[in-house]
Amino acid sequence: MKKIFILFILAAIILMSIGSFVSCAAKEAAPAKVVTLRLSGPWPPGDPVTDQLQGLVDKFNKQAAGKYQIALHPGSELVKIPESVDAVRTGAIEICGWPIGVFGSIDPRFAAAELPFAANNVEADAAMAVTLLPKYSAFMEEKFNCKAVFSFTCLALDVLSTKPVKTVADWKGLLVQAVSPQASKFIESLGGAPVPMDFPEAYQALQKKVVDATMQSSSMMIMFKLNEVAKYVTRGYLVPASIIIAINLDTYKAMPKDIQNALVDAGKQQQKEANDFFIKVAQENTTTLTKMGIDVYSLPKAERDKWQAMVQPYTDSLISAMGDFGKDVLKASDDANKKYPYK
């Protein structure tokens, strides 16, 4: 009887050991939870900028191999444009994209992306975006607790209007939608009257005659079907415009080194793809706008020089407010424009 009792105890111990081993093995075999980073942008699905954000998502998710993933939330689903910088700074959202120049009022260095006449054309604008990316990231890390992942040109703000705008005289009293502080000052400098509002509001503002004109990229003119409410476009690469995508710095620092490298690498790849895309699109948009029934006018260099001279005092004040960063912007501008002259 005693032997049977001892054997029973031994069997119970063995069974418990096996159960514990199986339980531990099951825990070890269970896949690790994927860390999801939310990427917010104001551009709607199908927008060319949203497509570029999706490109970053695809590249990073592939390299992160199931450890981390980015989930894209377009169309201001999570964050409105005015909240973008603060949302990333505080970590309310992990990653966000925004038009850089919109935040020139909270730090003059953001205005560098929309420095009037700083780029002769889209090629120069793209070159400046590449050169200035680490400069943007440096001050954003220091002041706004976020790291720049990549930036790219989204074409210049040119003029779409209900009547031709070909000379300085045509600006006098013109009511123009202004999508950023830099656009407002540009319009004022030429004698127009800026009406500040977010870029998606252009259609209704023109339709209801709240404004006579808007300053938008040619891609936005096409995307928002602005040919239905205005028939004249003046193209002269007036106010360059760029997009930046940034990640909360605490989130970035918490990532394993291989995941950090995957994000930086995906950003570099997507920056090149995005710039190449918009360079190609810039060539096509004139044809597209014309087919949409818009009268497209290319501003002659002599007239463009007149406009630039009138805006120059404002440009100089912006550069001065940027401190040493302004010197970096001027050098990037000079180098790019020498390589890509205005035509």
Image (cartoon, rainbow, N blue to C red):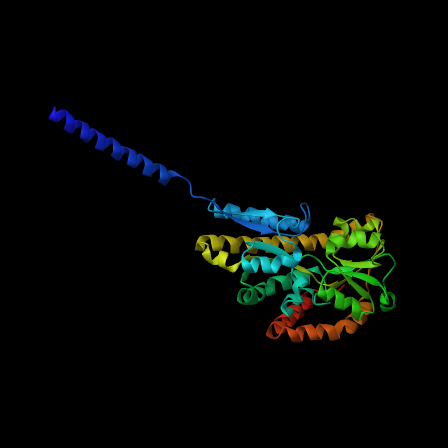
Picture quarter containing residue 179?
bottom right
Q: Position of residue 136 (x, y in %)?
A: 58, 65
21 to the left or right of 91? left
Q: Examine the rendered structure and indicate whether residue 325 appears above or below residue 86.
A: below
Q: Examine the rendered structure and indicate whether residue 259 appears above or below residue 11.
A: below
Q: Position of residue 219 (x, y in %)?
A: 73, 52
Q: Residue at x 83, y 49 (%)?
A: 228
Picture quarter containing residue 202?
bottom right
Picture quarter containing residue 218?
bottom right
Q: Quadrant of the N terminus?
A: top left
- The answer to whether residue 244 shows anywhere in this view is no
The residue at the far top in this view is: 1
Q: Examine the rendered structure and indicate whether residue 332 appears above or below residue 30.
A: below
Q: Examine the rendered structure and indicate whether residue 2 appears above or below residue 80.
A: above
**Between 282 and 45, the one nearer to me in the picture:** 45
Q: Position of residue 197 (x, y in %)?
A: 75, 59
Q: Quadrant of the C terminus?
A: bottom right
Q: Residue at x 62, y 57 (%)?
A: 84
**Between 98 and 295, the one nearer to me in the picture:** 98
**Between 283 and 134, the one nearer to me in the picture:** 134
**Between 142 and 267, the one nearer to me in the picture:** 142
